[in-house]
Image (cartoon, rainbow, N blue to C red):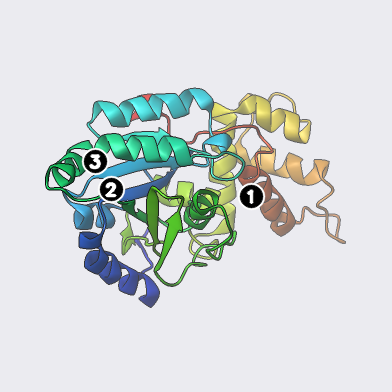
Amino acid sequence: MKQIQWFPGHMAKAKRLIEEKLPLVDIVFCLIDARIPIASQNPLLQGIIKDKPTLFLLNKADLADESQNQKWVFSFEKQGIPALAVNSLTGNPIKQVVDKSKAILKNVFEKEHKRGMTERPIRAMVIGIPNVGKSQFINKLSGKNKVKTGDKPGVTKMQVFLKAANELELLDNPGVLWPKIESKDAAMYLALIGSIKEDILPIDEICLFGIDFLIHNYPKGLSERYSLENVKEKTALEVLDEIGIRRGCISKGNEIDYERVFKLFLYDFRNMAFGRITIEHAEDV
């Protein structure tokens, strides 16, 4: 696979803004997708953050295997990286996020208290690649839809400070991808969950990659969704054809309409049709 190079102008600007605003915050909330905790990290941003206190938030934890969520949090904590699994859609993560942040910043606020400084809110910057749920996370913590949200990459285009309860102030940032995605697997993972646009990679390769992953890791969910049998004994292409036939994705020429099958499969993959899925398993890293 050729290197994917995709660095739109607004992302380059976002990188500069992050560098400028970083000294103004106490902590960085690094949102990653709980389904792909490694591939959804931006190595470019880690270089910018450097020694700034950071809390990794495995967002969309409700879409991922619960057992894997726990394993990933343990794995990060073991590496000295504070982490929490959160659900910004139907959950209410503010208490656990604030409590964890206070623990991380305990020494900072103790020093301020000794200097006679009054208590103040924690100032946090929210970063992450496109479509990991940053705006959704901020809306949940602030209690109102103060940040524009959307289901496609690139909705947030500017920086916004928001007050989230009395103990927390948040700085949102546009999602920032890195200039080159060199790993084929990482690119496929990102495409499967919708963090990079579908026209960056061939949609047929994305879907076949996803089906193959399900065959080897979540065959039951795949079988039940499309009423398939013996999926472990079939190739991804054979399963793709069966999905098209089962779902009536047939053209006027009585051939499988693959474009319809591709869109159907990606929709299902991104909307829990196969159950809770974690693509990157903690024990494999």
- In the image, residue 38 above or below residue 117: above
Report the residue marked by disc 3: 105
Question: Quick one: 178 or 108, which is closer to the camera?
Answer: 108
Question: Quick one: 126 or 12, which is closer to the camera?
Answer: 126
Which corner quadrant of the image does residue 97 belong to? top left
Q: What amino acid is labelled 2 in the image?
A: Glu
The residue mark sitting in front, 3 or 2, is 2
Q: Mark 2: which secondary structure? A: loop
Report the residue marked by disc 1: 266
Residue at 59% in and 28% down: 218
Q: Mark 3: which secondary structure? A: loop
Report the residue marked by disc 2: 119
- In the image, residue 71 above or below residue 259: above
In the rendering, at what x and y percent does residue 214 appear? 58, 33
Q: What amino acid is labelled 3 in the image?
A: Leu
10 Å crowding of disc 3: few (<14), some (14-19), many (20+): some
